[in-house]
Amino acid sequence: MNKKSLIGFVVGIPLLVIVLILIIVLNEPEPEGISRGLACKSAALLLTDRESLEKMPENQSYFSKQDQSVWYTKYMDYLYANGYLDPALMPADQETAQGFLTYQEAERLAEALAPGSGTNIHVGRKNRNKRITADEWWFLFEDLKKVLDKENQIKSLDVLLYGTPSNIRPSSSWTAYTSEGAFGFEGISLDSYIDWEVKVLVKGSEIIALKEAVSDSVTYRNAWLTSDGSQTFEVHLGSVVRTFPMEASLGQTEDFTNQVADISLKRGKLSKVTMKKKKISGKVLAITDSTIEIENYGTLKFDKDFKVYRLYGQFEERSVSDILVGYDIQDFVVAHGKICAALLVREFDAKTIRVLLMNTNFQSIFHPAVTLSSQTGLILTYDGATVQVPPKAEVIIEPSDERLKNGRIVASPLEKGGSIEVNSISRSYGTPSYDGTIEIRKNPEGLLLINELYLEDYLTKVVPSEMPDSYEKEALKAQAVCARTYAYRQIQSNTYSKYGAHVDDSTRFQVYNNLPTAAKTEDAVRETYGKLLFYGDTPIAAFYFSTSCGHTTDGSVWGGDPVQFPYLEGSLLQDGGAVLNLSTNSDFEEFIKNKDYPAYDSSYPMYRWETTVTNRQLEEEITEVGSILNVTVVERGVGGIVKKLRVEGSDGVMTINGEGQVRAKLGNKYMTITKKDGSVMKNFDSLPSAYLAIDNQGVDDKNITTFHIYGGGFGHGVGMSQNGAQAMAKEGKSYEDILKFFYHGVQVCEAKQVKE
């Protein structure tokens, strides 16, 4: 090689390397960025939720009309409106929203959200207008989350992704169907991760980000399968249905009809189907979060992915709370010694009810010991054994009793129609006796007593305990229908399912067997047999109370949405049921001070009442504001009931919300309540009702402020006034007339009539 060639070679090689480096640098793809719309969505959800954003008025949008329906507008509008974004620097248009966020824009947004956080982004002259990488944005987001999400509302979830609108028809736009329920996923690409396990960041019902693809192998456990006999079968996953091809290696189509199975997939392809065909059935005796006790099978654990499916009527996936204790209306799928699924196969008929019997003073559901007897003799069943007890002989059961080694003893009358006395408790009429059976269950805190009996027999002992049997027959019949409807809903609510019961016998539910039955109340129950109150095809929340102030209130009195109770509107207790505007203190005071204001129950002593209370007495219950200076009503509901009370004190101001809290906070043990007829009521810690007006009578020379309270009615004021019903019955109105007056738009019928 000559000298010139050598020099050219030496110089050329480095030049070639430089050229190649330049080509690589110039052609290197920009790092993956994040759109401004998605970044703004995540920023807005640090401060609020999607549901609130969707309520923002469209006429206040910064976007043009044609862009206002696009997913990102609500998030960016929120940031514009609250000063976190400047439309001059980040215009409200489609091109900007769909473009990539830059380092400088990320810095500005972070600073606006949490001053000082923008320094976490290294912005310089060279990168300020370059797109920020997605990873860098999400690192910044985590820093912002620590500052702004104080209540940890943003959660990280591992979910199995069932589908999106790309494979689920019909479906709502931007909706991801997952093992944890349905979520919105606006602006995020999820379609390629169907049938994957993924980690997502969520707030409420909206996915903020896809954090990680965890696995492309998934198993949908305890899924419900159906098939129409074709070459496909359906898998029911939550609220969606997926269709898969039937392959010869999997089995025959008939094997896939109405079965529970585990469905395994790899990268979206079906790899294995494991059928679970073993079923058991029996009466459910108790349910906890992790176990279920079934008659003749004992206590079994739930599988980790336990499911509940309703098979009658419209197929639907339900929850554990839909399994009713005391009923044999479901089958259970078992595998490996655990309950994999409950199949609700028959409709609930509300024929029986299970009642926890409380101790003598209704203070506890637990008993240190139990003593039973029966005039006709008893049959005790426990641990597979059956023992007869002679008439009138007492049986004493303590927690250490060997007969309880497997958890429970069931006592039944020896003769049909007999009853069981529980000698270890007392009620207002003495030793109570019960129809049906008495189940004694062992619990670490004591013994539980559960009375299982027919619902109609239960009602014969509820009605006289809730309404005097001296009342008119039609009033008692109205009470019977209310009590039956209330019990129907309580059975379904499963409040005491872990103890194997539906309700207890105290005022928390309906008072049961505190007074003896009478022929008149038994007739009222019998003559309304099976009748319930329905609004549409749903039994109503049949609230009732003792006495009105002349006006009832609506279903918002406990802080809920009145739309949930359209039949509880509140009205004046006169023919026609008009609604008075008693929202101002002056209007309500005029109404409540009129003791003769005409209403159905205006003749009853509790229709109007008065009392006085001092600030010193109130301070025993209200301790947050120092020395109380004044108490005023700041919000009234339908009928003038107090919803909010303002208490001013030497150390500050507080608000008392809700009729229950108002009654409890203003009531005290020193109080003497003077009724309309001049009689008095003492030893009553709570005010009779929250229909009240407060008159500050000033401060005396001992610096004591006295408040005079004018009130009316007894009870919460929602639904049926029992004394109002009595007055209406005296006027000749039927029980159906009474019920339709107090509960608007309802029908009185048996459950099966509604379904037909």
Image (cartoon, rainbow, N blue to C red):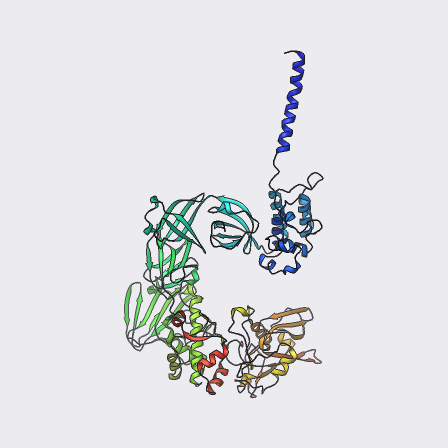
From the viewer's perspective, tell me whether residue 86 is left or right of residue 159.
right
Q: Relative to 283, is 93 above or below?
A: above
Picture coordinates of residue 104, whole percent (x, y): 69, 44
Front-most of residues 137 and 166: 166
Instruction: Give the quarter of the image for residue 345.
Output: bottom left
Front-most of residues 316 and 648: 316
Instruction: Give the quarter of the image for residue 282.
Output: bottom left
Residue at image x 71%, y 50%? 88
Q: Relative to 354, is 69 above or below?
A: above
Question: Which quarter shows the N terminus?
Answer: top right
Front-most of residues 617 and 638: 638
Picture coordinates of residue 198, whole percent (x, y): 50, 47
Picture coordinates of residue 399, whole percent (x, y): 38, 66
Question: Which quarter shows the C terminus?
Answer: bottom left
From the viewer's perspective, tell me whether residue 406 is left or right of residue 70.
left
Picture coordinates of residue 173, whole percent (x, y): 53, 54
